[in-house]
Image (cartoon, rainbow, N blue to C red):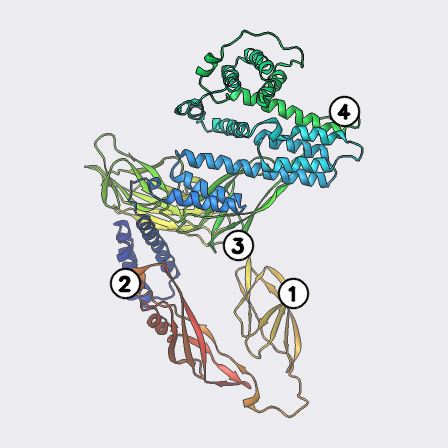
């Protein structure tokens, strides 16, 4: 390449970087595409174009998402329909038995509207369902293994979490079926344990509310819940009350004031007056159980006139009574269920120390082909089927982070159970879905009123922004400042962004990892480490030459030498992943069936094959040639090649004429990528193929190109035809003689 072309390329690159600093990314892309017109193979320019296009795409995707939901920046997303849609999807998933998906939808709604009490209550309900279902499944497994004691412990745990759990009754039935043949009393004792016989239907609902209230205590909402529960509803017009109903109301009134002895005395008195009333009998029985009193002659109690009882308003049973009843029932469960397996006298079962078993949970990410994952800050591999595993043998919370370009970072803290083996799926929200509070602060200035700008518009120092790429700048008279492109990612806490105000002899260097690079990096400037375990650094440096280096585990070092001026320097770092493979190239003629290490790889001509470092056995077969077995040594990052050199097998019959011999199709050996049409770039979100028929001459040149199918439009067909016209092919052959033939190719467009 001539020196003049090199100088022009450098000028165009410098001009593009200056435009990026000014926030004029589209103009910068135009300058960089001019570089590719001169030097189509310039990989560093192609990477820089990709980085800038990602930033532009992020902002465009945000605007699309925002407009589709008809809300603007600064307006709470919870005021729209998004939360309602999440709740509806959650309820649908719950009805279908997919509790995990239901919980994910509710968590998404919670991120939009953290104060929504309906969402928080539904989350507690779904979590409770998941916990009880898991305990139920484990109990059934223990019963199947002949371990009824552990199954009983699980029944107790289910009762503690949710006394009205649908699976509890079924589990008790299965425990009854497991009884010994001579333990007839188990049936009677299990029947006494039926929840419907111990608590009336409304009391079951109240017990569930108690459990929810206890769980809400952890979310610091207990005061509001208790206040709501204790606030009596509007009193309707009273109907005529019978003496028995008035007595019941009075008894419950004493219970609500925790006057259990008074309530028992009045219940016994009412029992003598209304011996046929089952509700009064039940109240007497329960109050006697609570007080430890046996069924003796009822003690006398002060008489209460029926008219006075009528005037007492009916109150909901207090939390204290329900909690006490639940404790009693839990003790009954333990006694009733454990007794049949004790063999006569109660046996004290020593407390078993459970050993935490290794767990393995598989995750899939819906709708994404490429993404990166870190577990507790360390990168993990994505498997060939697009899933990843979380494994461990120690109890504790694991932090999962999933990243993908154009999507919000997914973060979740998970406490996996002992021996857990399950398959879960997660969904990443598109950039622009969530709203984050951003607080701006300036460094480098002692006094003065700073003016803040976001995407060129003046804002306050604290602002709500939807997730996405923004250009931030702090302005103060007498100081220099450099606009910074910063990705506002999802965060439950307020995001603090620090912007530098510079002196007349300083400028700023900003480096950030690309969104699809997992984990964190170590940043160096002039040999000094300036950041470790982070994804972005911003440093103020004096004008002049500086060396930059970024190191990411399992990636090649990224390094640049820059001349820092008043315009500053900003770069999105996309290091190259360190390869552990080399390539094997197999000559296309004569054609052969290829088997590597016993695995069939197809037929030549074929693309280079990626192989792990080391020795590999390659078998080439062709019915017209003897089989050839070769051993090749693969070196990481290097190409190895072999040819089919076996002797030809003499035919038993007269040689076929050329027209009857198979045609070896052509294949491209030099390809030129299509230019992105301006209309398609402006439209954005264009993905698909253009199909073309190509007439390839006997010399491998392209004679003619015809567009067969252009499903994209927007000028993509013409761009694909222009690119394919510049391709060079290995020509088709028949009987070893090159021939002219038409072949069909496809050109893919992925325009964000």
At label 4, counting other C-alpha atoms closer than 10 Å, the crowd grade (few under 14, some 14-19, many 20 or more) is: few
Residue of label 4 = 347
Residue at the spot of label 2: 8
- Residue assigned mark 3: 386
Location of the C terminus (image quadrant): bottom left
In the image, 468: left or right of 180? left
Q: Is residue 187 visible?
A: yes
73 and 5: which is toward the camera: 73
Q: Residue 535: horizontal and vertical position, in percent? A: 42, 43
| Residue 483, above or below 612 | above
| Residue 336 at x, y percent in the picture | 70, 27
10 Å crowding of disc 2: few (<14), some (14-19), many (20+)? some
Question: How many labels were placed on the picture?
Answer: 4
Label whose residue precedes the other's in the sequence (4 or 3): 4
Q: Residue furthest left?
A: 477
* Measured Cα–Cα span from mark 2 to mark 4: 91 Å
Considering only order in the chain, which callout, 1 or 2, is on the residue closer to the N terminus? 2
User: Circle 4 sits in a helix, a strand or a loop, which is it?
Assistant: loop
Q: Secondary structure at mark 1?
A: loop
Which residue is more in the foreground, 565 or 339? 339
Contact? badges 2 and 4 (CB < 8 Å): no
The residue pinned by badge 1 equals 597
């Amino acid at each position: 390449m001539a020196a003049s072309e090199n100088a022009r390329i450098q000028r165009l690159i410098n001009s593009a970087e200056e435009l990026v600093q000014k926030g004029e990314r589209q103009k910068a892309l135009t300058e960089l595409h001019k570089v590719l017109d001169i030097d189509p193979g310039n990989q560093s320019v192609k990477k820089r174009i990709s980085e800038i296009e990602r930033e532009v795409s992020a902002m465009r995707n945000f605007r699309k998402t925002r407009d589709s939901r008809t809300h603007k920046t600064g307006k709470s997303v919870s005021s729209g329909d998004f939360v309602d849609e999440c709740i509806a999807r959650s309820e649908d998933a719950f009805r279908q038995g997919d509790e995990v998906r239901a919980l994910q939808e509710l968590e998404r709604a919670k991120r939009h509207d953290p104060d929504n009490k309906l969402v928080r209550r539904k989350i507690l309900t779904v979590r409770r369902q998941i916990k009880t279902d898991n305990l139920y499944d484990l109990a059934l497994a223990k019963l199947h293994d002949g371990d009824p004691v552990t199954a009983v412990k699980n029944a107790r745990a289910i009762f503690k979490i949710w006394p009205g759990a649908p699976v509890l009754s079924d589990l008790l039935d299965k425990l009854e079926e497991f009884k010994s043949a001579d333990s007839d009393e188990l049936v009677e004792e299990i029947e006494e344990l039926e929840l419907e016989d111990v608590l009336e239907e409304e009391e079951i609902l109240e017990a569930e509310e108690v459990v929810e209230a206890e769980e809400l205590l952890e979310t610091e909402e207990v005061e509001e819940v208790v206040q709501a529960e204790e606030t009596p509803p509007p009193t309707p017009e009273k109907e005529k009350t019978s003496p028995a109903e008035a007595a019941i109301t009075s008894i419950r009134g004493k219970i609500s004031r925790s006057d259990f002895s008074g309530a028992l005395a009045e219940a016994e008195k009412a029992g003598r007056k209304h011996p046929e009333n089952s509700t009064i009998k039940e109240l007497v029985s329960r109050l006697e159980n609570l007080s430890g009193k046996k069924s003796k002659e009822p003690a006398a109690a002060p008489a209460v006139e029926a008219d006075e009882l009528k005037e007492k308003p009916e109150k909901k049973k207090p939390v204290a009574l329900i909690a006490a009843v639940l404790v009693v029932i839990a003790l009954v469960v333990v006694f009733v269920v454990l007794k049949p397996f004790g063999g006569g006298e109660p046996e004290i079962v020593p407390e078993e120390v459970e050993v935490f078993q290794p767990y393995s949970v598989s995750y899939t990410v819906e709708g994404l082909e490429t993404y990166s994952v870190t577990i507790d800050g360390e990168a993990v591999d994505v498997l060939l089927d697009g899933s990843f595993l979380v494994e461990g043998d120690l109890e504790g919370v694991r932090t999962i982070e999933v990243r993908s370009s154009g999507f919000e970072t997914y973060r979740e803290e998970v406490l996996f159970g002992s021996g857990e083996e399950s398959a879960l799926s997660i969904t990443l929200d598109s950039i622009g879905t969530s709203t984050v509070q951003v607080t701006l602060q300036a460094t480098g200035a002692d006094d003065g009123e700073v003016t803040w700008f976001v995407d060129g518009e003046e804002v306050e120092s604290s602002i709500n922004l939807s997730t996405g790429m923004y250009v931030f700048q702090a302005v103060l008279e007498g100081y220099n400042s450099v606009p910074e492109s910063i990705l506002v990612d999802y965060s439950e806490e307020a995001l603090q962004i620090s912007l530098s105000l510079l002196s007349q002899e300083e400028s700023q260097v900003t480096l950030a990892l690309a969104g699809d690079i997992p984990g964190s990096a170590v940043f160096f400037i002039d040999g000094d480490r300036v950041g470790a375990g982070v994804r972005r650094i911003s440093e103020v440096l004096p004008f002049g030459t500086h060396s930059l280096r970024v190191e990411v585990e399992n990636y090649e070092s990224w390094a640049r030498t820059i001349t820092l001026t008043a315009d500053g320097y900003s770069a999105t770092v996309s290091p190259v992943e360190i390869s552990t493979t080399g390539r094997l190239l197999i000559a296309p003629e004569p054609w052969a069936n290829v088997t590597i290490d016993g695995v069939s790889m197809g037929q030549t001509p074929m693309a280079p094959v990626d192989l792990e470092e080391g020795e590999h056995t390659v078998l080439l077969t062709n019915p017209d040639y003897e089989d050839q077995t070769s051993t090749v040594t693969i070196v990481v990052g290097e190409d190895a090649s072999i040819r089919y050199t076996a002797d030809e097998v003499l035919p038993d019959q007269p040689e076929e004429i050329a027209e009857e011999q198979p045609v070896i199709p052509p294949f491209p050996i030099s390809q030129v990528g299509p230019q992105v049409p301006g209309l398609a770039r402006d439209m954005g979100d264009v993905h698909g193929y253009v199909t073309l028929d190509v007439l390839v001459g006997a010399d491998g040149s392209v004679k003619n190109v015809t567009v067969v199918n252009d499903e994209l439009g927007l000028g993509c067909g013409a761009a694909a035809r222009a690119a394919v016209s510049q391709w060079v092919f290995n020509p088709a052959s028949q009987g070893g003689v090159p021939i002219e033939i038409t072949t069909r190719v496809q050109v893919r467009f992925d325009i964000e």
